[in-house]
């Protein structure tokens, strides 16, 4: 029996039907379709989180100049407090809200009689104690069910305190995964924040970094490189990010999209409203970082910038070459599986290739078909009941602020040469015979680990120890196991070091006690 | 660190800042992991269980398995019955546990899902079980969720007509596998035949073998939970986690319980051993008396380093009460004792303890948060913090040594293997506390005050 049949054969008919289109073996050269962004099957241990986790946890949580109040019982706020490694340094005034957790800690009477009074009071207290310029409200499941009008409370707070206050109805039951929350957060930022401050950038070549959450300091490494070449980063969505900067995002010349899944809505909407072009980039991996830099320089078309880009790439690569060669010698020939939330499962394949590590399986926790197959499929994606419940914002051209950086001819030219406003998806970059699995669950993780026997399984904390206990090195690509950065040139060295460290940990060789050495061979033989 | 926290305290009635508690379901999930071949199941949207599994895995550095009903908007409107039916079928088909322990979430509680009715209507395979408990996140804390899940197992399974047996039920409370192992060792040395419920040892502290087992050998068996109906007595450790299940067992099966604090420090461990001795008829053996003596020896040897050091203790009520008792025995001076879990019983218990040692000069608060604790500390500093990982922010901001104890500890390895309970746990804590204080002194003192011998 082949891999797919072996796994599906364990399922009952209904689950079989529900899961069969979420798994595929890559047939290079063929156009393949995968089912994605569909409901998880109840009872199968999915790794997915919820809408709130996508909105508050991913997109809004990293904003350091913003007091994000979770409106709900205590759990949701507590779990999303300081647990995602989205690093941030205090702003100019030493303010950093991300060390704090704010919650209305709703109690039974609030559920019975309504929680809006408590929310109003909580904002008042936050304003009194912290004097924030920006307050955001994120609602959790019961708030939507009891019908608290958080948007009215937010509007009132703006009037009463002269602050920016935006409410996000990101109840956990909305959509089918975190993805719905990303969309809701994108909508709120677009509606209320972007475009609020017209202060022009201090220098030319101004860009925004979209979908970079500064996990382990990735964003800082990317910014370091961009600044070296000569770019000015207006705003970052949202790692080490500030709403004050995001309000000026429309003044940038170009949007660089790192995590396609979580932020592509903003990129698209900004193109419509402000004419800002966007470019899908990937700063994970040496080849892809260099290629991204070249494409950005090509967008601006300035020869000096292009020359400078080549100088920086050459210099950065030369500086790390001895380390990269060494780690490559230790890693070459290994096989990896990757299961992460959105775009990382794709991005890290580039970095792994730099070290001679092949991908045998990759999947997204909450990707959509376009993340797998490329954006050309978007018009053909059928909306289901769950996705229809998430607002698709229609934005209009902002005549006052609309600014096309490129001439129409140049725009058309760059569309094909540097892939402006396009993303070809993950599958196209995957080797023939490798596996793509959407919303991989606990059962399938175990099965695939047995059947494909990868040397390294990149995943998250929930299955990390399942894999490690079965003898497969597992590294977390959500939090980098408290290491990083992994982005850019210097990050690649840290990644290579961490992988080598993990694979060659002395403990692996001692798993089988000497008195049992004859009983089994190759046990946990990673090293 | 925490630069936005002002010294001036402002009245707060609505805004919780930097909480010292979380919600009921995660406690229920942890309790259910202590039942053999049990799959905990969260009846709500899938984000809840994702957070809970993450939280527990980060604390134990072990897989924490649990499934979910994966509610969508439709389920909220039409009720979660269909999701639960589908989930239960799939769980028994794919993962094959012996029992599914369902807990609710604020979502399913708010829409009023009737789990009793849903479960009665389920088709459950022979010799398999589905039990449930209600864990509304907007009531109490994770500690209540833990006790409620235990009560749920008892309601469904404990057999009121079970033949009387000579075993003793031990409810170890919301503790680590290392604590449970220690309590079992004590029971063994006291010749007590016990049913430990729940029992996360050999579930949440599995050895590395190269083989992952989804259902490891540990955990209280279903048969043992059924037998709880016929035990001699219950030793329920930790009033806040265990009062509810002890009460349910008494009302259902007429089993009396001895509800006592977690055996942390000398007096509370003495109390447990005497209760065990009364039940087994066996005197406390020399081995344990020696352990007790060694702990006392350390307490006296290092006494100057503990004496009158101002201490803040925070975390879950049972653990905090246990730590406070030990702190008082060591000669530390408790200054702030807080828990996030609401309930005035906590303040009563702590104040009684403090009064015993004439240490009334201490602020005690239930339903508190770490922001408030930090503000108190800013106004009057302490020398030592004892509590969970979330206090590390305060420790760094104010340069106060922190001894980690309780739930959750997300930033250290190996802690859950070792006990805080019993004389052994006391020995470990006493050493950790003295070392933390002395390391801090070494690091901050002037060169001329630096001693190689202390």
Image (cartoon, coloured by chain):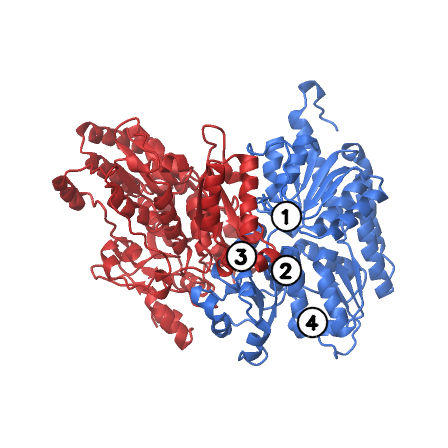
Q: Report which quarter residue A211 is drawn in.
A: top left
In percent of width and height, residue B379 lies at: 68, 31
In percent of width and height, residue A242 lies at: 41, 36
Q: Are marks 1 and 2 in contact (CB under 8 Å)?
A: no
Residue placed under numbered mark 1 in the picture: B415
Give the foreground label among 4 and 3.
3
Label annotation for residue B53: 3
Crowd class of label 2 (few under 14; some 14 to 19; many from 20; radius 10 Å)? many
Question: Does dot 2 land on a helix, a strand or a loop?
Answer: helix
Q: Is residue A230 above or below residue B270?
A: above
Q: Is residue B389 visible?
A: yes
Q: Quadrant of the N terminus of chain A?
A: bottom left
Q: Is residue A493 visible?
A: no
Whether labels 2 and 4 share one chain: yes
Residue displayed at 53% across by 38% down? A127
Of B71 and A86, which appears nearest the observer? B71
In the rendered image of the structure, the colour used to display chain A is red
Comes first in the chain, label 4 or label 1:
4
Residue placed under numbered mark 2 in the picture: B145
Give the foreground label among 2 and 4.
2
Q: Report which quarter residue B276 is drawn in.
A: bottom right
Cα–Cα span, label 3 and label 2: 15 Å
Cα–Cα span, label 2 and label 4: 21 Å
Question: Does dot 1 land on a helix, a strand or a loop?
Answer: helix
Comes first in the chain, label 3 or label 2:
3
In the rendered image of the structure, the colour used to display chain B is blue
Cα–Cα span, label 3 and label 1: 18 Å
Whether labels 3 and 2 share one chain: yes
């Amino acid at each position: 029996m082949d891999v797919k049949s072996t796994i599906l054969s364990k399922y009952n008919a209904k689950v079989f039907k529900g899961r069969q289109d979420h798994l595929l073996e890559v047939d290079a050269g063929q156009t393949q379709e995968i089912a994605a962004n569909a409901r998880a099957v109840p009872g199968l241990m999915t790794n997915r989180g919820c809408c709130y986790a996508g909105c508050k946890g991913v997109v809004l949580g990293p904003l350091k100049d913003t007091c994000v109040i979770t409106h709900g019982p205590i759990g949701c706020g507590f779990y999303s407090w300081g647990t995602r490694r989205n690093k941030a340094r205090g702003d100019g005034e030493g303010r950093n809200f991300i060390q704090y957790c704010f919650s209305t800690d709703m109690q039974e009477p609030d559920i019975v009689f309504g929680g809006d009074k408590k929310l109003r009071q909580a904002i008042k207290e936050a304003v009194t104690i912290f004097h924030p310029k920006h307050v955001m409200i994120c609602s959790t499941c019961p708030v939507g069910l009891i019908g608290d009008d958080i948007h009215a409370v937010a509007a009132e707070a703006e009037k009463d305190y002269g602050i920016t206050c935006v409410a996000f109805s990101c109840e956990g039951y909305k959509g089918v995964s975190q993805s719905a929350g990303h969309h809701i957060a994108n909508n709120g930022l677009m509606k209320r924040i972007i475009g609020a401050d017209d202060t022009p950038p201090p220098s030319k070549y101004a860009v925004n970094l979209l979908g970079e959450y500064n996990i382990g300091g990735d964003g800082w490494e990317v910014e370091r490189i961009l600044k070296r070449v000569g770019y000015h980063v207006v705003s970052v969505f949202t790692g080490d990010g500030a709403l004050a900067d995001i309000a000026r995002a429309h003044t940038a010349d170009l949007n660089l999209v790192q995590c396609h899944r979580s932020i592509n809505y903003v990129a698209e909407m900004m193109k419509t409203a402000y004419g800002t072009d966007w470019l899908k980039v990937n700063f994970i991996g040496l080849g892809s970082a260099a290629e991204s830099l070249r494409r950005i320089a090509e967008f601006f078309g300035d020869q000096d910038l292009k020359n400078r880009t080549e100088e920086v790439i050459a210099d950065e690569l030369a500086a790390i070459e001895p380390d990269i060669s060494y780690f490559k010698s230790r890693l070459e020939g290994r096989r990896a599986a990757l299961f992460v939330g959105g775009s990382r499962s794709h991005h890290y394949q580039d970095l792994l290739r730099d070290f001679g590590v092949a991908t045998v399986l990759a999947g997204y926790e909450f990707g959509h078909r376009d993340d797998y197959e490329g954006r050309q499929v978007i018009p053909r994606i059928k909306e289901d009941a769950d996705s229809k419940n998430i607002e698709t914002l229609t934005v209009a051209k902002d005549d006052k602020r609309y600014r096309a950086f490129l001439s129409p001819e140049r725009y058309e030219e760059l569309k094909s040469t540097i892939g402006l406003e396009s993303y070809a998806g993950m599958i196209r970059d995957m080797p023939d015979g490798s596996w793509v699995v959407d919303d991989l669950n606990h059962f399938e993780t175990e099965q695939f680990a047995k059947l494909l026997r990868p040397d390294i399984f990149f995943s998250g904390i929930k299955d990390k120890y399942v894999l490690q206990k079965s003898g497969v090195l597992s590294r977390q690509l959500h939090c980098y196991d408290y290491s990083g950065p992994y982005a850019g040139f210097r990050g690649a060295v840290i990644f290579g070091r961490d992988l080598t460290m993990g694979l060659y940990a002395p403990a692996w060789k001692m798993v089988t006690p000497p008195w049992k050495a004859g009983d089994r061979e190759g046990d946990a033989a990673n090293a | 660190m925490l630069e936005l926290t002002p010294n001036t305290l402002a009245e707060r009635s609505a805004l919780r800042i930097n909480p010292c508690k979380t919600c009921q379901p995660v406690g229920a999930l942890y309790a259910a992991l202590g039942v053999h071949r049990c799959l905990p199941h969260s009846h709500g949207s899938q984000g809840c269980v994702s957070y809970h599994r993450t939280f527990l895995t980060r604390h134990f550095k072990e897989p924490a398995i649990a499934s979910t009903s994966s509610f969508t908007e439709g389920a909220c409107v039409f009720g979660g019955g269909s999701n639960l039916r589908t989930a239960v079928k799939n769980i028994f088909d794919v993962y094959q546990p012996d029992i599914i322990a369902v807990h609710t979430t604020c979502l399913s509680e708010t829409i009023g899902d009737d789990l009793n009715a849903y479960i009665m209507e389920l088709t459950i395979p022979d010799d398999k079980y589905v039990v449930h408990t209600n864990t509304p996140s907007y009531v109490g804390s994770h500690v209540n969720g833990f006790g409620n899940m235990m009560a749920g197992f008892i309601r469904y399974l404990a057999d009121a007509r079970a033949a009387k047996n000579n075993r003793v039920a031990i409810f170890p409370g919301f503790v680590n596998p290392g604590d449970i192992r220690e309590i079992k060792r004590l029971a063994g040395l006291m010749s007590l035949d016990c049913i430990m419920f729940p029992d996360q040892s050999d579930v949440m502290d599995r050895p590395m073998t190269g083989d992952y087992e989804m259902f490891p050998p540990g955990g209280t068996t279903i048969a043992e939970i059924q037998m709880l109906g016929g035990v001699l007595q219950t030793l329920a450790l930790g009033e806040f986690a265990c009062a509810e299940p002890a009460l349910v067992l008494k009302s259902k099966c007429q089993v009396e319980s001895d509800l006592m604090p977690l055996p942390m420090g000398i007096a509370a461990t003495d109390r447990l051993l005497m209760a065990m001795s009364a039940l087994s008829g066996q005197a406390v053996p020399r081995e344990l008396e020696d352990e007790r003596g060694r702990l006392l020896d350390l307490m006296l040897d290092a006494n100057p380093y503990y004496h009158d050091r101002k201490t803040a203790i925070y975390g879950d009520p049972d653990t905090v009460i246990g730590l406070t008792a030990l702190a008082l025995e060591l000669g530390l001076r408790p200054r702030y004792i807080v828990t996030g879990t609401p309930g005035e019983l906590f303040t009563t218990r702590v104040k009684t303890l403090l009064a015993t040692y004439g240490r009334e000069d201490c602020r005690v608060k239930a339903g508190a948060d770490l922001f408030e604790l930090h503000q108190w500390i800013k106004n009057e500093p302490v020398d030592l913090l004892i509590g969970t990982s979330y206090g590390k922010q305060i420790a760094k901001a104010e340069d106060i040594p922190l001894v980690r104890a309780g739930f959750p500890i997300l930033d250290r390895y190996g802690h859950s293997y070792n006990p805080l309970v019993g004389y052994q746990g006391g020995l470990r804590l006493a050493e950790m506390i003295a070392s933390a204080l002395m390391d801090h002194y070494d690091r901050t003192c002037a060169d001329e005050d630096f001693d190689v011998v202390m």
